[in-house]
């Protein structure tokens, strides 16, 4: 493939290295807003930038009929607009709050456990996420995905909030610490015991490789997708 990397920071550099080793060609390494000419006829754009610029980055790629794999979090209040643009331009858009294979299996485990525990109100639920101090949004997109899946599967909750769980608001504690790539935990606590599921990332390579796999998968497709489609977890 010919790949445009939109948002050439730490993640972009890792994607560059791993994709090149897989035989793909990196035709653009963009730190600025893309243009038709700067995208260099890319087959796909992989977008890892900042919440403030993600919408415009994605919009320009889609309007030029370049499918987008997006891993930027913190801008999702406009996701429905992006999905409409992708459909109108007969191209494809795939957003992932986390592209790691392990995290996406963790998402599936979280949904199954939430459904199982819905019948046991004696357990309270709390989420925790730990990330490096450079991360700009809190809670993480991964933690929000975990919380939303619990809410769907447990009628006790109708929303999530930062800090502690309170009544019908599922709590997410967001911790920023040194250079932690990402750790996510879900706790079910009663007066007598605790059940915990946890995913710990050791480095960013898993996120980058998942994004490349998604880019390979989306070739020739039109529509709105997620990592569940890529991994056959639907």
Image (cartoon, grey):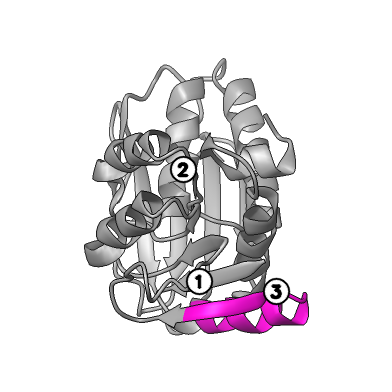
Tell me if mark 2 has few (under 14), some (14-19) or many (20+) residues whose alpha carbon lies within 10 angstroms of its own.
Answer: some
* Residue at 40% from the left image edge and 61% from the top image edge: 72
Compared with 29, 143 (above or below) is above
Query: Is 167 located above or below residue 202 in the figure?
Result: above
Q: CA distance from mark 2 to mark 3?
A: 30 Å
Say whether residue 26 is left or right of residue 54.
right
Question: In this view of the protein, can residue 100 be seen by the observer?
Answer: no
> Where does residue 85 sit, x and y in percent of width and height?
33, 40
> Are the residues at dot 1 and dot 3 in contact (C-beta closer than 8 Å)?
no
Q: Quadrant of residue 116?
A: top right
Q: Which mark is residue 167?
A: none
In the rendered image, the quadrant that contains the N terminus is bottom right
User: In the image shown, does 18 or 85 lie closer to the viewer?
Assistant: 85
Tell me if residue 162 can be seen. yes
Closer-to-camera residue (136/216) = 216
Dot 3 corresponds to which residue?
24
The residue lying toward the viewer, choosing from 28 and 141, is: 28
Q: How many marks?
A: 3
Image location of residue 33, percent across then percent down = 28, 72
- Label 1 neighbour load within 10 Å: few <14, some 14-19, many 20+: many
Q: Which residues are magenta?
A: 12-28
Name the spot of residue 172 as percent of width and height, x first. Answer: 37, 49
Indicate which disc residue 145 carries: 2
As displayed, is residue 136 above or below residue 146?
A: below
Task: Give the residue number, with chain letter if any, for mark 1.
Answer: 4
Q: Earlier in the sequence, mark 1 or mark 3?
A: 1
- Secondary structure beneath disc 1? strand
Q: Quadrant of the C terminus?
A: top right
**Residue 59: image location, x then y, percent:** 31, 53
Q: Residue furthest right?
A: 22
The local secondary structure at tag 2 comes to: helix
The mark closer to the camera, 2 or 1, is 1
């Amino acid at each position: 493939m010919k790949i445009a990397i939109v948002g050439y920071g730490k993640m972009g550099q890792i994607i560059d290295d791993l994709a090149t080793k897989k035989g793909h060609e990196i035709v653009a390494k963009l730190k600025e807003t893309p243009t038709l000419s700067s995208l260099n006829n890319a087959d796909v754009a992989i977008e890892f930038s900042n919440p403030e610029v993600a919408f415009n980055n994605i919009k320009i790629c889609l309007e030029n009929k370049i499918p987008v794999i997006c891993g930027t979090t913190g801008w999702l209040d406009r996701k429905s607009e992006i999905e409409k643009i992708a459909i109108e331009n007969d191209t494809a858009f795939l957003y992932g709050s986390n592209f790691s294979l392990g995290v996406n299996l963790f998402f599936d485990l979280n949904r199954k456990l939430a459904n199982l525990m819905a019948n046991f109100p004696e357990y309270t639920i709390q989420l925790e996420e730990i990330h490096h101090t450079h991360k700009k949004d809190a809670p993480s997109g991964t933690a929000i995905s975990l919380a939303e899946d619990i809410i769907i599967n447990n009628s006790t909750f109708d929303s999530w909030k930062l800090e502690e769980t309170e009544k019908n608001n599922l709590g997410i504690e967001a911790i920023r610490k040194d250079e932690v790539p990402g750790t996510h935990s879900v706790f079910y606590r009663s007066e007598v015991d605790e059940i915990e599921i946890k995913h710990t990332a050791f480095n960013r390579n898993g996120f980058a490789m998942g994004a490349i796999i998604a880019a390979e998968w989306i070739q020739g497709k039109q529509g709105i997708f997620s990592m569940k489609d890529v991994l056959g977890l639907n």
